[in-house]
Image (tube, grey):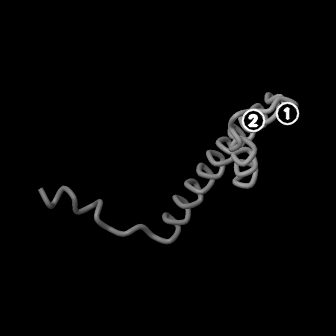
Amino acid sequence: MLNNLEPFSHPPSKQEFAATFRVTSQISFWVQLALGSVSTVALLFASFSRNISNKTNNPGIRLGIFLAIISL
């Protein structure tokens, strides 16, 4: 059983590690960009769909939208 695992146990070379790291970093960049875009669109819908002239019973809405903008 241990002999079957022998070929897979060598550490990757620097080139293999760099190639894997490059692909992983590109994928994570595009995933993060897509998720940031989705949350930005959701925040824009939330902030522009509110009627500012009406007073709401929930005073935390302004703070929530402010903190969402700061977090983006």
**Residue 5 badge:** none
Q: Residue at x 37, y 69 (%)?
A: 11
Horizontal and vertical percent position of residue 20: 52, 58
| Above or below, comparing residue 3 to residue 36 in the picture | below
Helix, strand or loop status at disc 1: loop
Q: In the image, what residue type sits under mark 2?
A: Val
Q: Which residue is mark 1?
A: 52
Q: Residue at x 88, y 31 (%)?
A: 53
Q: Who is closer to the viewer here, 58 or 49?
A: 58
Horizontal and vertical percent position of residue 55: 80, 33
Q: Residue at x 29, y 60 (%)?
A: 8
Horizontal and vertical percent position of residue 28: 59, 51
Left or right: 3 as drawn, with respect to 17: left
Locate residue 6: give its quadrant.
bottom left
Q: Residue at x 69, y 54 (%)?
A: 71
Q: Residues within 10 Å of mark 1 (few under 14, many from 20)?
A: few
- Spatial CA distance of label 1 from label 2 is 19 Å
Helix, strand or loop status at disc 2: helix
Q: Who is closer to the viewer here, 60 or 49?
A: 60
| Above or below, comparing residue 9 to residue 35 in the picture | below
Q: In the image, what residue type sits under mark 1?
A: Ile
Q: Residues within 10 Å of mark 2 (few under 14, many from 20)?
A: few
| Above or below, comparing residue 71 to residue 65 in the picture | below
Q: Which residue is mark 2?
A: 41
View extreme (right): residue: 53
Sequence order check, earlier mark of 1 and 2: 2
